[in-house]
Image (spheres, helix red, strand yellow):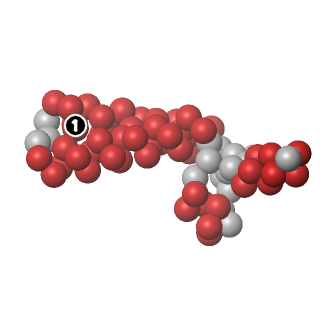
Amino acid sequence: MELKIVKIKNMFKQNEGQLDKNIRLAIGLIALLLGLFIFTDILQIIALAVAALAFFTGLTGFCGLYKLLGISTKK
């Protein structure tokens, strides 16, 4: 059981720096506001999905695409 926990913890290791996280949170906020107050129909769904993804990556400091590409902006 202990080994599985360590593997999962290493799998989601932070790979975003503070500037990267702040930019993602700002994009998430803008996308959320656009999705709630400006866009309708499919654009609203897209904006809210972008907001959710940006908030998730900004708050956790983990980007799956960065992981796949071997990129890290964390110092």
Q: Report whether residue 18 is seen.
A: yes
Residue nearer the viewer, 23 or 11:
11
At x 72%, y 54%, the residue is 11
Query: Is residue 74 something one can see in this rendering?
Result: no
Q: Nearer the viewer, residue 23 or 66?
A: 66
Work out which residue is located at the far bottom of the displayed protein and give it.
69
Instruction: Provide residue 43's location: percent of width, then percent of height.
Output: 17, 49
Question: Could you tell me residue 9's position as x and y percent?
Answer: 76, 46
Q: Residue at x 26, y 50 (%)?
A: 46
Residue at the far left in the pictured view = 40
Q: Nearer the viewer, residue 22 or 64?
A: 64
Left or right of residue 19: residue 28: left
Q: Does dot 1 land on a helix, a strand or a loop?
A: helix
Q: How many marks?
A: 1
Q: Is residue 52 left or right of residue 47?
A: right
Above or below for 47 versus 64 = above
- Label 1, residues with CA under 10 Å away: few <14, some 14-19, many ≥20: some
Q: Residue furthest right?
A: 2
Q: Residue at x 55, y 62 (%)?
A: 65
Judged left or right of residue 43, residue 11 is right
Instruction: Point out residue 16 in the picture as x, y percentages from the top left corner.
Output: 63, 47
User: For mark 1, what is the residue?
Assistant: 34
Identity of the residue drawn at 69% across and 50% down: 12
Residue 28 against residue 65 in the figure, above or below: above
The amino acid at mark 1 is: Leu
